[in-house]
Amino acid sequence: MTSRTERILIIDADKKARENLSRYLEARGFYVIGHSDLSSAKALFDDNIPDVIFADLSPEAIADLSARLEEAETFTPIVACSCSESSQDVVHALRAGAADFVLKPCNEDRGALDDIIEKLFDRVRVNRLNQLYRHELEEANRDLRAGIAELRADQRAGRKVQLRMLPDREQDMSGLQIDHLIKPSLYLSGDFLDYFRISEDKVLVYIADVSGHGASSAFVTVLLKNLTNRLQRNLRRQSSDDILYPERVLERINSELLDTGLGKHVTVFVGIISMSERTLRYSVGAHFPMPILSFEGGKTAFLEGSGLPVGLFEAPEWEVYQVPLDKPFHLILFSDGILEVIKAKSLDEKEQTLLELVSGGRHTIESLSEALDLDEITELPDDIAIVSVTDTINGTDNTSSK
């Protein structure tokens, strides 16, 4: 008969019974080891633990053996062997930890013995497979946890980079007080904003929402920051004045996004405020919702305008819009994530809520955050970005400028 790899241990003080069972099992192809008592067999547990044990032992000794096997964290069933047909002996053996019970001589009823062996080895194989799968799963979970920890560390580092790219909050520049808020739905944000002085009396402000979420969208925000820094540097060197024209800024972003091949597009609002001319000139790259312009003691409304997304088409054109700023004003820019946290049924109702908040005097970051409970929301459905621009020359809110 072909040799099998399964190992069977026989513990029986009766040498003849032990040898008879051993011969039968070896003839069936099993690797068999025999011992007369438990103490001499215990050395096996330090090396190769058997797959099945036939043992003619007292219930106490079976319990001791079962505990030793449990300590070794191995599934090795014990078959209690006995000359006694007492049901009480069977119950005691099973309660002590035996998986089955056979009457001696064990190999007298070979059909029953074969059935027991086959059943137990099926259980052993299933249990060993489960142990293997459990071990592999634990290894995979450890690798996954390590990967997640590394990813979180990378995202935290990326978040720090993004925060450092943002402008300082509560800035006074050219007669304007500008503040902002960004709340990412994940570690990294696909929303971005910036504002800076481009001349003594002109300030550029923009807000952008990159398609998608996570790291790939965050990379595009780095591109935006790098591009606007280069455009400012070009203006200082007098090599290019693209930064002075909102439509050209969109064209440059569009060109660089297409060159990256990331498959990302951006919605952008770019506005240039001239305090000497008292005008706002802007271009819209499919940004939504449109910024709200509120005049003190006057009208509060969304700015007009539309345009194609940035980063999708080879040579799009964007229109330039202009509105006069002939009264003290507040300009509020939002990303579309703000609409997700407004408790209203329709889009029109959400936009109307924004208008009512701003017209009611909620035109600062703090007041808008309070009105919309932004600090209380722990899980955002989308990134949120807000920029508030306040006229400090003619406005009643502030009297100082820098």
Image: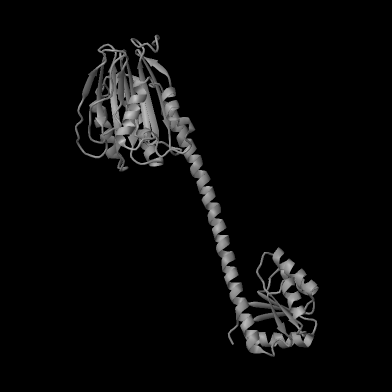
x, y percentage for residue 171? 41, 18
Q: Residue at x 39, y 9 (%)?
A: 399
x, y percentage for residue 234? 29, 23
Depth check: give the residue in front, 347 or 143. Answer: 347
Q: Residue at x 28, y 35 (%)?
A: 256
196 relative to 136, above or below: above
| Image-based side of 280 in relation to 401, left or right | left
379 relative to 94, above or below: above
Quadrant into which the C terminus falls: top left
Depth check: give the residue in front, 100 or 350. Answer: 350
Q: Residue at x 57, y 65 (%)?
A: 132
Quadrant into which the N terminus falls: bottom right
Camera sees residue 100: yes
Q: Residue at x 33, y 40 (%)?
A: 211
The answer to which quarter of the image holds residue 285 is: top left
Camera sees residue 29: no
